[in-house]
Amino acid sequence: MEMDFERCYRAVDSRDQRFDGWFYTGVTSTGIYCRPSCPAITPKRQNVRFFPSAAAAQGAGLRACRRCRPDAAPGSPLWDVRADVVGRAMRLIADGVVDRDGVPGLASRLGYTERHLHRMLSAEMGAGPLALARAQRAQTARILIETTDLAMAEIAFAAGFGSVRQFNDTLREVYASAPSDLRTARGRQQAPAGAGTIALRLAYRPPLHARALLDFLTVRALPGVEAVRDGTYHRGLRLPHGTGQVALTPADGHVAATLRLADLRDLAPAVARCRRLLDLDADPAAIDATLAADPALAPVVAAEPGIRVPRAVDGFEQAVRAIIGQQVSVTSARTTLNRLLSHRVDHEVDEVDEDRTPGQPHDQRGELRGFLSAEELLSLPDSGFGMPVGRREALRGLARAVVDGSVDLAAGVDREEAVRRLLALPGIGPWTANYLAMRAFGDPDILLGSDLAVRRGAAALGLPDTPSTLDRYAERWRPWRSYATIRLWRAA
C-alpha cells in the first residue's frame, strides 16, 4: 500500500484524529509507532516512516506508544468497506479466524493458497496474516491484563497465544514491557466484577450520531435477545466458543463496552462484532461530504452529522429478520420474531422453570441470549413459526443452506457471490438480498429504492420517489448509498 508522505506528515503535524487507523507513524529515533493524532512533539521528517498497519510497524521493530495507544485506534475504513480479498481477509482476521483455524483456514475461506494470500496482504498491509493476527493477540492480551485479575497463563491462552513463552516474548516486543509491568501500570484500577467480565472503550471517528443508532435498534429490539435502557444497548451474543452478553453505551469519543463472556477466547470476535454492529470504523467526514453535496440532503446531513449504518453481529439472525420483514411493517415483523423466539424459549426452558409465564422474555429475568442458530430454527415444529407456509419454508431453506455450507453469511464473505446464492433460494428476492448486503455484509453502496419507507423519505425531502427514478437520481450518492438509505428512512 503506497501512502503519500506529505499528506501523512501534514496529518501528523496537525494531530488530525480523522486519520487514526488509516496509517501508523513510525519514529525511528525513538523506536516507537503512534497514531497520527498522538499529542507528542511532531518528529522530524527524516525520522518518520509510515505504515499501513500496526503489524507492519511491529515487523519493522517498533513498539507501541504508551501515550496514544495506537493499537486501540479505530479500524481503517478502507478495509471495513472494501469488498476485495484483502478487505475480506482483514474482516475475518478481526473475527478471530486465524486464531481458530490458522492461516490454512483463512486461505480456504477466501479461496486462495496460503502463499498467494500472504503475498497480497504483505503488499497491501505490510504484513502477512500471521503477523496481523499476532498484533491483534497482543492487543487482546493487553486488554485482559488491564481489565481483569486473571493469571497471566490464562490470559495468554485466552488471547490466542500457543504458549506462555510466546505470550511473554510478543508483549515485550510490542510494548517493551513484561506482562506483569503492564498490570502494575494499571495502578489501583479495579477489574470489573464477575468472572469473564471485561470493560473497554471502542474508539470511533467523530462525529457519531448515537441517538440515531439507538433509535434504530430500539424499535427492532427483540425481548430476550436485546434491550435498550437508559441510553445503553444490551444484547446476547452467540460466539465461536460460547455465549456472551454486551452492554454498549455511546460516550464522547468512544463507546463504553462491558462484555460478559463464557469463554475469554471470544474477546476479539466479540469486539469485532460490536464494532461492526455500530459501524464504528466508518469515516463519517467522507460520507457526509459526499451526501451533503446534494442540496436535497444537505440540510439533513447538517442537522444530523455522523449517521451510521446499523449492521449485524450475526448474519443468520439478520437474514431471518429480513425474510420475516418482507413487505410488512417493522412492528409486524417484530411481533412475528417475538413469537418465533418465545416458542424457542418455551420449548427449552418451561419444563425446568414452572414459575415463568409462557413466552415471558428473558430480559425480564435479567438474562439475554443470542438469536436462534440455523440448527435451532430447523428443529422448531410448524406451530413455532406463526407465518404463511411460503415464508416458513423460505426460512427453513435458508437454514438448510447455512448448515450445509452452500450459503455463507459471515462478515468476510464475497458479497456478490453471497447475494447470488441468496437469490437462488426460494422466497428470497432482490430487496432481501440487498438488505443483507447492506446490514450483514457491510456493503456501503446499497440503495433500497423499492422500499416503501425509503420512497416516503425521498418524497418528504422532495426527491424522486418511484424506484426507477430514485435509482437514477441516487447515482450521485455513490459510494455511500447505504448511508443515504438510512437517512431516507429517518426522513420517513
Image (cartoon, grey):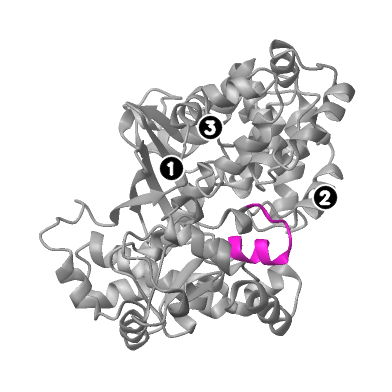
Q: State the CA–CA distance, disc 3 to disc 1.
A: 13 Å
Which region is colored magenta?
81-92
Secondary structure at numbered mark 3:
helix
Position above or below: 80 against 299? below
Q: Residues within 10 Å of mark 2 (few under 14, many from 20)?
A: some
Residue tagged 3: 341
Q: Could you say which disc has been placed on residue 421 in the image?
A: 2
Position above or below: 311 against 128? above
Secondary structure at numbered mark 1:
strand
Visible residue check, residue 319: yes
The amino acid sitting under disc 2 is Arg
Q: State the CA–CA distance, disc 2 to disc 1.
A: 28 Å
Position above or below: 302 against 401? above
The amino acid sitting under disc 1 is Gly
Q: Residues within 10 Å of mark 1 (few under 14, many from 20)?
A: many
Marked residue nearer the N-terminal end (3 or 2): 3
Magenta stretch secondary structure, dominant: helix
On the image, the x and y values in percent for residue 222 come to: 49, 29
Q: What residue sits 56% from the left and 36% below the top?
A: 308
On the image, the x and y values in percent for residue 399 come to: 70, 46
Please state, as top left, top right, bottom left or bottom right, where the N terminus lies in the image. Answer: bottom right
- Is residue 256 toward the left or the right of residue 486 in the image? left
**Which of 492 and 238 lies nearest the eye of the viewer?**
492
- CB within 8 Å, label 3 to label 2: no
On the image, the x and y values in percent for residue 109 come to: 69, 68
- Is residue 266 toward the left or the right of residue 318 in the image? left
Residue tagged 1: 236
Residue 88 falls within the magenta-colored stretch:
yes
Most extreme residue toward the left, as rendered? 188
Secondary structure at numbered mark 2:
helix
Q: Residues within 10 Å of mark 3 (few under 14, many from 20)?
A: many
- Asked which quadrant contains residue 82, the reply is bottom right
